Image (tube, rainbow, N blue to C red):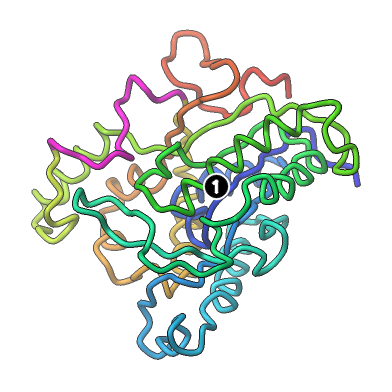
Amino acid sequence: MALPARRLLLVHAHPDDETINNGATMAKYVSEGAHVTLVTCTLGEMGEILVPELEHLAADQDDGLGAHRLTELTDAMGILGVTDFRRLGGDGRFRDSGMKWDENGNATAADEIHANAFWHADLLEATNELVAVIREIRPQVLVTYDEFGNYGHPDHVQANRVAHYAVALAAARSYRHDLGEAWDVAKVYWTAMSESAMRQGIKEIREAGDLQFMEGMDPDNLPPFAIRDEDLDAVVDGSTWVDAKLDAMRAHATQIAVDGPFFALSNDVAQRAWGTEHYRLVKGVASPAPGTTFEDDLFAGTGV
């Protein structure tokens, strides 16, 4: 199958992670004719359920949340225009590991983890599934989490490990010929949030009278996914696709409260909060336009 010249691959842990982190970026590149592929590592079987009438889908009841979240993901991708979205190794190959909060307020592995949990997956086995995708799609750009999974969730951390190992092995000419022809991904990015933008957003929303927004969040002591601006490499302006991103978030109804404060932001704040997506470049050469600090195109410098 002939693919467009520009190809973007995103590796995420659960349905909804892709929309929250990269929804505007995905919609932007789809609209520009790029081929966007999403690989989701689990079905999010252990997620919390925010819709009361669907609480029976919980893992300790009917255990049907994963199948339901796949329908949510399908709806969200339809809104963003993404037609190539897959689960790593197929539906249910790796199960959501669940999580708990540690004493520092970060996510960590739960006390009890399913035998098929992604956190327990053999790293090479999981990686080979992604190597095959990389060699099939031959993306110039791959996006995933940082080494801490942005906030510590074990599945996010594992997705980071699998993505980086797969990038290395996919490029090895002599490795697993049966998985396709070798391909070197030119650029790898980690998702991020701007520390300054996050601090300013909290300030503006609280000044507007919403004291519940991120209650307990100290603007001077932000979580680890808030990255210093000098450590950011790319800023994608997805303001044109904010409405699509918000609609895609609403499609993930079991996970995102559509009546929460995030959806009550003023237009100006919402444009910046949801339409501006930040990245750290961890493989490849940064190529910002002359006279600028940040790249505005993830494909910059790749020759396509």
Judge the density around disc 1: few (<14), some (14-19), many (≥20) Cα neighbours within 10 Å. Answer: many
The number of numbered discs placed on residues in the rendered structure image is: 1
Name the spot of residue 286 as percent of width and height, x first: 54, 17
| Residue at 22% over, 52% down | 105
The amino acid at mark 1 is Ala
Location of residue 67 (image quadrant): bottom right
| Residue 41 placement, left or right of 102 | right
Using the image as rendered, state which of residue 245 and residue 128 is in the foreground: 128
Using the image as rendered, state which of residue 269 and residue 126 is in the foreground: 126
| Residue at 62% over, 26% down | 187
Residue 269 against residue 58 in the figure, above or below: above
| Residue at 68% over, 45% down | 124
Magenta segment main secondary structure: loop
- Magenta segment: does it hold 1? no
Residue 291 against residue 52 in the figure, above or below: above
Q: Which quarter of the rendered picture does the C terminus lie within?
A: top right
Location of residue 6 (image quadrant): top right
Name the spot of residue 214 as percent of width and height, x first: 19, 55
Location of residue 257 (image quadrant): bottom left
Residue 273 against residue 71 in the figure, above or below: above
| Residue 84 placement, left or right of 235 | right
- Magenta segment: does it hold 225? yes
Name the spot of residue 252 as percent of width and height, x first: 47, 69
Using the image as rendered, state which of residue 286 and residue 88 is in the foreground: 88
Q: Which residue is mark 1?
A: 159
Element under disc 1:
helix
Q: Which residues are magenta?
A: 220-233
| Residue at 45% over, 9% down | 291
Task: Identify the residue at the far top of this view.
Answer: 291
Name the spot of residue 83 as percent of width and height, x first: 71, 58
